[in-house]
Image: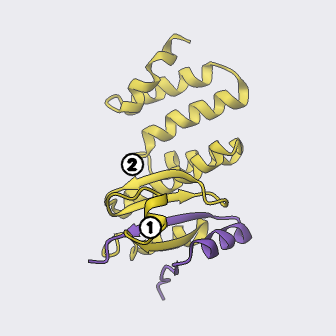
Amino acid sequence: MNKQLEWKTDFKEAVEQARKENKAVLFFFFNPA
Amino acid sequence: MDAVTYPDQQVADYIDDSFVALKMAYDTQPFAEDFKVKWTPTIFVLDQSGNIHQTIVGFLPPEEFIPALELGLAKVDFDLDCLDECQHHLNRILGSHPRSASAPEAVYLLGVTRFKMTEQGGALKEAYYQLQERYPDSDWTRKASPYRLL
């Protein structure tokens, strides 16, 4: 079973999770059009 | 990126292991303005305080995206003076992705990291000669060229 990426959409939540899990943040800006 | 790179299983596994993934539309305020986003895709590698250490603008295929992100992790550690960890990331790039576009910069940064750890100019000189041998046409080889005089 392939694992899907789980994307956060809240900046503060992403940074807090990165601290908890000792990870960096990949911040992706995209064009939805 | 959404069609090709992110669905790639190696990319997904790599990101999941080392990053928290955060996604926003290019015009989401105040972030688009704060991060000065002018084009898409734009990808930033941030540390745990939300500071930028690597910026990627434009599409990268999976085989280039993974080493580019690893270089971002190396830059986080370099900027935070975690030099052992920085070396670890750079060696991973050179071991697993030696033909990637990120590899020449990894050799350069590895030389600088080793110099900072040892204060021996030979680390910089060695980086130049490795660049000259492996990536003679790279901008990073030109940037390292003064080190041959050390």
Picture quarter with the N terminus of chain B:
bottom left
- Which of these two is toward me, B104 or B46? B46
Q: How many marks?
A: 2
Q: Position of residue B120 (x, y in %)?
A: 68, 20
- Position above or below: B66 against B77: below
The label number, if any, that marks residue A28 in the structure image = 1
Residue at 61% in and 60% down: B50
Residue hosting label 2:
B100
Residue B132 visible in the picture? no
Q: Secondary structure at mark 1?
A: strand
Q: Horizontal placement of B93 versus B59: left or right? A: right
Q: Position of residue B142 (x, y in %)?
A: 39, 24
Q: Position of residue A29 (x, y in %)?
A: 41, 67
Picture quarter with the C terminus of chain B:
top right
Which color is chain A depicted in? purple
Residue at 35% in and 33% down: B138
- Mark 2, Cα crowd under 10 Å, few <14 / some 14-19 / many 20+, is some
Residue at 38% in and 64% down: B62
Which coloring applies here? by chain
Q: Horizontal placement of B39 versus B16: left or right? A: left
Residue at the extreme left: A33
Residue A12 visible in the picture? yes
Which color is chain B depicted in? yellow
**On the image, which quarter does residue A12 sit in?**
bottom right
